[in-house]
Image: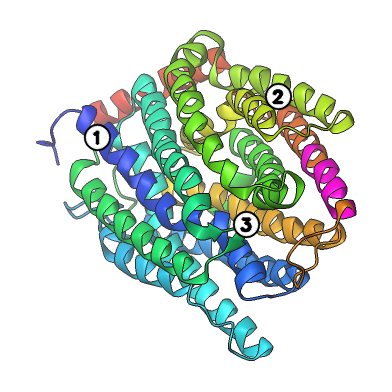
Amino acid sequence: MNNVRPFSMKDKIGYTLGDLGCCCTEQFRAMYLTIFYTLVLKVNPIHVGILMLITKFWDAINDPIIGALVDSRENKGKGKFIPWIKAFAFPTAVLCILGFVNVSNFAYGARLAYMFISYVAYEIMYTCVNVPFGSLSSVMTDDVNHRTDLSRYRSLGGTIFMTVIVITGPLFLYKDNQPVPQNFLIMAAVCAGIGFVCLMITSHWCKERVILAAPPKQEKLSYVQIMKEIAKNRALLGVMLSSFIGIVGAGMVNALNTYLFRDYFGNVAIMAVSGMLSVLWSLIAFIGTKFVAKKFGKKEWTMYSATFSIIVFAVLFFFPLDNPLLFIIINGICFLGVSGFQVLVWALVNDAIDYQELQSGQRNEGIVYSAYTFFRKLANAVSGSMGSFALAIAGFNVNAQVQSEEFAGNLWKTYTGIYVVGYLLAVLVLKFVYPLTKEKTAEMLEELAKRRQEGAAND
């Protein structure tokens, strides 16, 4: 491993493709699985919410278990994380496709059973890919600027996927404002195939360079002790809690997005325009984040920019818009405000991994990262469930071709209100819990570099 090539653009592109590969299955499911369940399989949104709550809760519990397994395996020359990505990328792709099989002719109970089994099986396989992939960035480099770049490039992978899917999805999946069942399966197969190819490229282009000494053979991994140490990690707690709250709010809004355009604005196809404009917003966020984060600090910029978007949506709550194009433009500008939570969050997690090493002397990337993804999965469980519950409470009728005006009005208030409350609470937690300001992050990295040099000299 000492002969591994230096960190380069190839690593950044490889990591971008890895995030794209993960998004091709996970984000496609997040965007369209609830819609598929309610509009195609005709499943009550309350039942969908309960299903997602149960399955995602199990998936969240599963994350630290996989993280512990990853950390317990030694790097024998082929990498610590890359072999996991290679092994589980294909079954993840297959199970993504199976989730969109049209079983609407099944009895209602059989539909629920199929949904449950396919959902749980997919999430287990995806965890075996995503936890190692997320941990990978912490061992690709220990340079703070390179890590910020990796976080930015990782967000670019998701941005590429969201741009394409938001443009093509509404045009391909619907006809005359109604879903086309077989097209959901076709698009799932295309996304899964692209995702698999991207992850294979990642496993060849990304290299693991930060290799720490393995613990003595006689010492067994103490999972309980590690979790106790994590509980003392304010940086990790801060990023976990702020992400949890922000993801719940953003996830609920995203779950209602298609219904907002379909049933409030009356034109689901116009979402394609949002996808086209998102290219502009994403490029601005991708290019600009590096400079503003360097100037103000990762934590500081994330809070400042999100506050702007919170204020805008608070105004929209009281003054509804009827013009979908105006809403798309305003929503896109607000995306720039909250983009710090998407673009910089992974850099914050890497800093939390370093903070853990600073406190305990042990790195445990897999477990620290999986502890963070545990909260993300819990947030996804809550947001997916709450989004479905909010849909039902607003008055959504699963058997109606056209929803009522009362439902449309309730949907607007729910959409904008959740946005404001979710991001406001996330900003407050980041401010008062997460300790790593720009200055403190620099001090931490300097101290870790000193310790590693001393350790190398002693060896």
Q: Nearer the viewer, residue 147 or 192?
A: 192
* Residue wearing tag 2: 309
Q: Are marks 3 and 2 in contact (CB under 8 Å)?
A: no
Residues at marks 2 and 1 touching, judged by CB atoms closer than 8 Å: no
* Whole-percent x, y for residue 16 in the image: 33, 38
Check disc 1 and report its element: helix, strand or loop. Answer: helix
The outermost residue toward the left is 3
C-alpha separation, residue under disc 2 versus residue under disc 1: 33 Å
Label 3, secondary structure: give it. Answer: loop
73 left or right of 438 in image: left
Front residue of 151/140: it is: 151
Secondary structure that dominates the magenta span: helix
Q: Earlier in the sequence, mark 2 or mark 1?
A: 1
Question: Could you say which disc has been placed on residue 177 in the image?
Answer: 3
Amino acid type at circle 2 is Ser
The label number, if any, that marks residue 26 in the structure image: none
Q: SS for tag 2?
A: helix
Residue under pointer 1 = 11
Q: Which residues are magenta?
A: 406-416
Observer-side mark, 3 or 1, equals: 3
Q: Is residue 128 highlighted in magenta?
A: no
Please state the horizontal and vertical placement of residue 270, each as a whole percent of the image: 59, 42
Point out the tag, 3 or 2, that comes first from the N-terminus: 3
Q: Amino acid at mark 3?
A: Asn
The N terminus lies in which quarter of the figure? top left
